[in-house]
């Protein structure tokens, strides 16, 4: 069974590429952003807590995210593969993912990193904001999200490099080109 982490800055195309990989391989998909947005839509307590952080471009506290992740993962078993999209976003989350999988006799197979320059990220998210209805897709919040990414999430690049699991792919160009590069890595696992 493959456990694939898809990694990148906000707007790098994690969700977009995950959808294509799910279609091709039939993997299950855990998008922590989607999980949180569903909770917000349903007005649950978790959704109300998450909204305060998301609308400000901040990350949800690790303890909360780690519990959600484990519950979502177990609800999807058995599976041939799982794509983790938007998790981990901090080093404690990466450690928790490793422990959670180890307890289930599993491990991360690869971390696929989508590299996209900042100007392109901002342009993509501002564009998405015109139709997404997402309160965090406006220029001011996007810039905050990029700062949070650089401070809290980017250190995971070295963390996964040291684990020997990091594979970086150019995250701009056509969706098909990017997808073909990701598939090459997955097929080589
Ligand atoms: P997410 O929902 O994970 O969102 P994202 O990082 O904004 O987007 P993604 O990279 O998936 O981009 P997409 O494919 O949509 O997180 C939202 C928030 O939830 C976070 O800020 C945080 O507050 C919270 N959260 C989530 N997980 C958390 C965690 N683990 N811990 C704590 N907090 C957490 O692509 C973006 C746009 O680019 C789209 O419009 C797309 O059409 C376009 N695009 C994609 N590929 C393209 C290409 N090749 N060329 C041109 N445009 C492209």
Image (cartoon, rainbow, N blue to C red):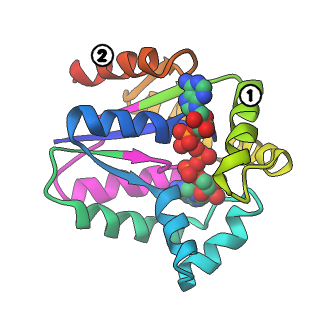
Read off the magenta span.
84-111
Q: Out of 148 and 26, give the one closest to the viewer.
A: 26
Q: Height in image: 48 above or below 157? A: below
Comes first in the chain, label 1 or label 2: 1
Q: Which residue is mark 2?
A: 184
Q: Say which residue appears at 37% left-offset and 29% top-offset.
A: 165
Q: Is residue 105 above or below residue 46?
A: above
Residue 86: percent from left, percent from top:
50, 48
Q: Position of residue 156 (x, y in %)?
A: 54, 39
Residue 41 location in percent, x, y?
56, 73
Q: Quadrant of the N terminus?
A: top left
Q: Marks 1 and 2, Cα distance to the nearest angstrom? A: 26 Å
- Residue pointed to by mark 1: 118
Residue 156 shows up from this direction: no
Residue 47 circle label: none
Answer above or below: position of 117 versus 157.
Answer: above
Q: Residue at x 47, y 37 (%)?
A: 16
- Left or right of 30? Residue 11 is right
Q: Nearer the viewer, residue 165 or 130?
A: 130
Q: Is residue 98 left or right of residue 138?
A: left
Where is residue 179? Give x, y as percent: 39, 22
């Amino acid at each position: 069974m493959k456990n694939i982490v898809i990694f990148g800055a906000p707007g790098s195309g994690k969700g977009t590429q995950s959808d294509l990989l799910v279609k091709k391989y039939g993997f299950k998909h855990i998008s922590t952003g989607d999980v949180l947005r569903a909770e917000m839509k349903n007005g649950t307590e978790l959704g109300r807590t998450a909204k305060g952080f998301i609308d400000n471009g901040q990350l949800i506290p690790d303890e909360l995210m780690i519990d959600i992740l484990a519950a979502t993962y177990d609800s999807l078993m058995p599976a041939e593969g799982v794509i983790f999209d938007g998790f981990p976003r901090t080093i404690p989350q990466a450690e928790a993912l490793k422990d959670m999988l180890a307890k289930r006799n599993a491990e991360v197979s690869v971390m696929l990193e989508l590299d996209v320059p900042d100007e392109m990220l901002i342009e993509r998210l501002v564009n998405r904001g015109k139709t997404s209805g997402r309160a965090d897709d406006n220029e001011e919040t996007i810039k905050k999200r990029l700062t949070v990414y650089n401070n809290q999430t980017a250190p995971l690049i070295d963390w996964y490099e040291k684990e020997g699991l990091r594979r970086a792919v150019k995250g701009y160009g056509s969706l098909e080109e990017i997808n073909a590069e990701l598939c090459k890595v997955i097929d080589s696992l």
